[in-house]
Image (cartoon, grey):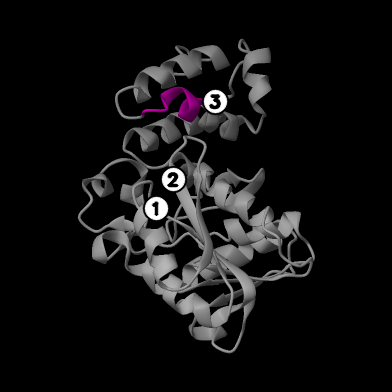
Amino acid sequence: MTQSSYSTIAEALQWAYSQLAATSESAHVDAEALLLHCMNKNRSFLYTWPERQLTSEQFKAYSQMIAKRQSGTPVAHIIGEREFWSLPFIVNESTLIPRPDTEILVETALNLSVRHNAKVLDLGTGTGAIALALASERPKWRITAIDKVPEAVELAKANRGNLNLTEVEIIQSDWFSAVEQRDFDLIVSNPPYIDEADEHLHLGDVRFEPQSALTAGNEGYADLYYIAEQARAHLLPGGYLLLEHGYEQAIKVREKLIELGYQNVATVRDFGSNDRCTLGQWAD
């Protein structure tokens, strides 16, 4: 692409759509997001000023970004950011890119009946998206976020600083190992839950994300079951466990929670009406 051929916003977008159509299921959204990043503008600008000229620097940067997206690199990794719960999160290759469906877990947690200064644990925090989204809505909650991966812990801390949610505690831990003597009103987690043999691991954006944050043994149930078993020793009476899982895993997760003695077990659906997270209450 040359500056003379595609010099306006409208022309650049049309070119980008054509370049991405064969490799991205969201070509229009991707093209717009990348151009917005290059121009440092909001979405309405694209439609208000379609005839606006791109500078040569913007044009060059946009071309390079489109080439990366053509190769499969996720948009979030290209621009280094992803919005979650209307908050901007820094992202990189050390952990998962926050998904819109995970906002259902945040929404469900916010609707639970817990005390105003509840103690909350986020297991496998990654970017810190869940913990920091909760903190933005419930400033009096005492939230601890943990991750096993040092790079993810540093990323979550960076997001904590950028969002000025400094009251959230972020520590490195292999699941419960660093909080053995602590109890919580609410434990939330979006753990690895994809079957290690799932063919979709070789498709789309997940190719660029760490497999350790995506897959689990026992057909994807290993970490879900482990958390459910261990959480009982860390929940206060009446405390809740809330787990995100795959859309086909709800039945087995509910059965496991009931088997382990949880009460008021229920599953919540995501924006696409798929079973997305399951919760249970610990009575003992």
- The residue that mark 3 highlights is 56
Q: Position of residue 109 (x, y in %)?
A: 63, 56
Residue 269 visible, this orientation: yes
User: Are there few (<14), some (14-19), or many (20+) residues within 10 Å of tag 1?
Assistant: many
Residue sitting nearer the eye, 132 or 66: 132
Q: Earlier in the sequence, mark 3 or mark 1?
A: 3
Query: For the residue marked with disc 1, what is the amino acid?
Result: Ala
Say whether residue 113 is left or right of residue 240. right
User: Are there few (<14), some (14-19), or many (20+) residues within 10 Å of tag 2?
Assistant: some
Where on the picture, by quarter, is residue 19? top left
Locate the N terminus and report the quarter of the image it occupies: top left
| Residue 204, disc | none
Residue sitting nearer the eye, 119 or 208: 119
Inter-mark Cα distance, 2 to 1: 6 Å
In the displayed structure, 68 sits above or below 282; it is: above
Residue at the (34%, 32%) spot, across then down? 70
Q: Earlier in the sequence, mark 2 or mark 3?
A: 3
Query: For the residue marked with disc 2, what is the amino acid?
Result: Asp
- The residue that mark 1 highlights is 250
Q: Which residues are magenta?
A: 25-32
| Residue 275, disc | 2
Query: For the residue marked with disc 3, what is the amino acid?
Result: Ser
Residue 204, magenta (yes or no): no
Residue 31, magenta (yes or no): yes
For numbered disc 1, what is the local secondary structure? helix
In the displayed structure, 71 sits above or below 245; it is: above
Disc 2 + disc 1, Cβ < 8 Å: yes
The secondary structure that dominates the magenta segment is helix
Q: Earlier in the sequence, mark 2 or mark 1?
A: 1
In the displayed structure, 97 sits above or below 256; it is: above
Disc 3 + disc 1, Cβ < 8 Å: no
